[in-house]
């Protein structure tokens, strides 16, 4: 019988499970671990994983409106604007007002930004590999597929849904 509902058939009574075996806890811990690995592997360039994502998205998308960039990387508009401002100060990104709508800002990767992205590529790849290293190689793609399914099926309820 569930202490909170009085229902014998309460689905997934997570309260009874140890904290360390709950999905939210494990996902948060894996994220913390991956961030630590990324920062270790990419320390020479001083990029955060979110900055790396923004640079990668700009490399793939070309010049893009900040709102579209926000949707592409799943980070809210305010935070993307702050990340872009930091990247702009380092001359990795250039911003300008949209010629079609002066209220919108466009961002584009600079040659310096493209060069730093190329320099950090190997370190980022090592961080990804190290994050997955404990899994047998045969299970890694399946794990990534499962993560993608969880993200895609819950994307709409996110504070910053990914589109595109």
Image (tube, rainbow, N blue to C red):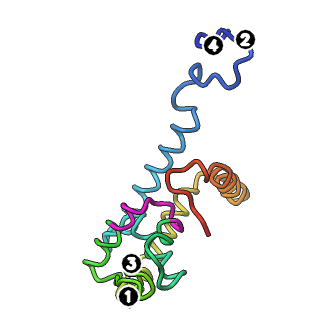
Nearer mark to the viewer, of 4 and 3: 3
Check if residue 133 falls in the magenta segment.
no
User: What is the quadrant of residue 104 in the picture?
Assistant: bottom left
Q: Going 38% across and 76% down the picture, which residue do you hit?
A: 103
Which residue corresponds to mark 3?
105
Relative to residue 3, is residue 97 depicted above or below?
A: below
Lower position in the chain sequence, tag 4 or tag 1: 4
Spatial CA distance of label 1 from label 3 is 16 Å
Q: Secondary structure at mark 2?
A: loop
For residue 72, which numbered disc appears in the image? Answer: none
Instruction: Mark 1 or mark 3: name the one nearer the start of the chain.
Output: 3
Q: Quadrant of residue 105?
A: bottom left
- At a point 40% along the width and 80% down the height, the residue shown is 107
Q: Position of residue 70 (x, y in %)?
A: 47, 66
Left or right of 8 in this view: 72: left
Q: Quadrant location of the C terminus?
A: bottom right
Residue that numbered label 1 is attached to: 110
Which range of residues does the magenta coloring cover? 71-81
Pointer 3 and pointer 2: residues touching (CB < 8 Å)?
A: no
Residue bearing mark 4: 5
What quarter of the picture does the N terminus occupy? top right
Q: Considering only order in the chain, which callout, 3 or 4, is on the residue closer to the N terminus?
A: 4
- At x 32% / y 66%, what residue is drawn? 82
Residue position for label 2: 8
Camera-nearest label, 1 or 3: 3
Question: CA separation, marks 2 and 4?
Answer: 8 Å
State how far apart marks 3 and 2 are (Cα).
Answer: 55 Å
Q: Is residue 144 left or right of residue 59?
A: right
Is 80 in the magenta? yes
Q: Is residue 68 above or below residue 2?
A: below
């Amino acid at each position: 019988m569930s202490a909170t509902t009085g229902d014998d058939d309460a689905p997934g009574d997570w309260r009874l499970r140890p904290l360390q075996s709950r999905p939210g806890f494990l996902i948060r811990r894996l994220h913390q671990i991956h961030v630590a690995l990324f920062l270790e592997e990419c320390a020479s360039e001083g990029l955060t994983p979110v900055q790396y994502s923004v640079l990668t998205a700009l490399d793939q998308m070309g010049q893009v409106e900040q709102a579209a960039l926000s949707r592409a990387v799943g980070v809210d508009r305010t935070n993307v604007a702050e990340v872009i401002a930091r990247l702009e100060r380092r001359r990795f990104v250039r911003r300008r007002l949209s010629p079609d709508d002066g209220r919108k800002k466009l961002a584009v990767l600079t040659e310096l930004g493209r060069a730093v992205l190329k320099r950090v590529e190997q370190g980022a790849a090592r961080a990804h590999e190290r994050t997955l290293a404990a899994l047998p190689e045969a299970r890694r793609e399946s794990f990534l597929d499962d993560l993608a399914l969880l993200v895609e099926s819950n994307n709409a309820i996110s504070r910053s849904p990914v589109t595109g």
